[in-house]
Amino acid sequence: MAQGHAGFAIVGCFTQDLVNNLIEAAVTERLPPVTFSLPSLITVDGRQVTLAGDFAVLPPTVTLADRPDGLVAVRARFVADLRLAGLTPFPVDVAVELGCSLLVGVSVAVVNNRFQVGLDLSQASFTQVDVTVTDGPALVRAYRAALTSGPVIAKQIVPKMA
């Protein structure tokens, strides 16, 4: 036992599966659907790309691993049916999943007589952003770049409750 705890302590351990099940249940059962609209016009390599569609936010998943910085890996996912235009002769309709990997801090607090553990997004740093087409044609590079651009990522950080 740690000397700073007078020889006793209470320790709770949570598995990665339990944490992810709790997050999924909270998102799907307790929150209204969360969505974000895309910026309608984005410039990629000097060319204008028009984006139309709303992303739905899926429950994030957490990967628990020992890290010297104490951060936790989170995988956020968003799905949408989109229409992309401006770089091809005709608009392109696709269903996509946008995924983001990020590192976040963990916060612990006692609020209203409840012990709360949460993710501290003030320390968040994106480590990867990817696009997977789930239905429709492959995306040209510039459409893929538009979907992983700063304005789209900024929308993911502050989605709206439906």
Image: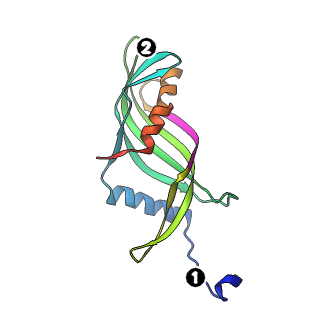
Percent position (x, y) of residue 80? Answer: 38, 36
User: Does residue 113 appear anywhere in the picture?
Assistant: yes
Q: Nearer the viewer, mark 1 or mark 2?
A: 1
Please say whether residue 94 is one of the residues in the magenta stretch.
no
> Residue 14 placed where, x, y %?
54, 69
Q: Earlier in the sequence, mark 1 or mark 2?
A: 1
Q: Is residue 82 left or right of residue 14?
A: left
Q: Residue at x 35, y 43 (%)?
A: 35
Q: What label sits on residue 55 in the rendered view? A: none
Extent of the magenta region: 124-133
| Relative depth, front residue between 108 and 138 | 108
Q: CA distance from mark 1 to mark 2?
A: 61 Å
Q: Is residue 50 left or right of residue 145?
A: left
Q: What's the amino acid at mark 1?
A: Ile
| Mark identifier at residue 88 | 2
Look at label 2 and name its amino acid.
Thr
- Residue 23 lies left or right of residue 7; in this view the side is left
Q: Quadrant of the N terminus?
A: bottom right
Q: Quadrant of residue 12?
A: bottom right
Residue 10: give its label.
1
Q: Are marks 1 and 2 in contact (CB under 8 Å)?
A: no
Where's residue 68, x and y in %? 70, 59
Our reading of the magenta stretch's main secondary structure is strand
Q: Residues within 10 Å of mark 2 (few under 14, many from 20)?
A: few
Q: Residue at 40% of width from left, 10% of height from top?
A: 89
Residue that extends furthest to the bottom in the rendered view of this protein = 7
Up-down relation of residue 10 to residue 146 (above or below): below
Viewer-closest of 122 and 73: 122
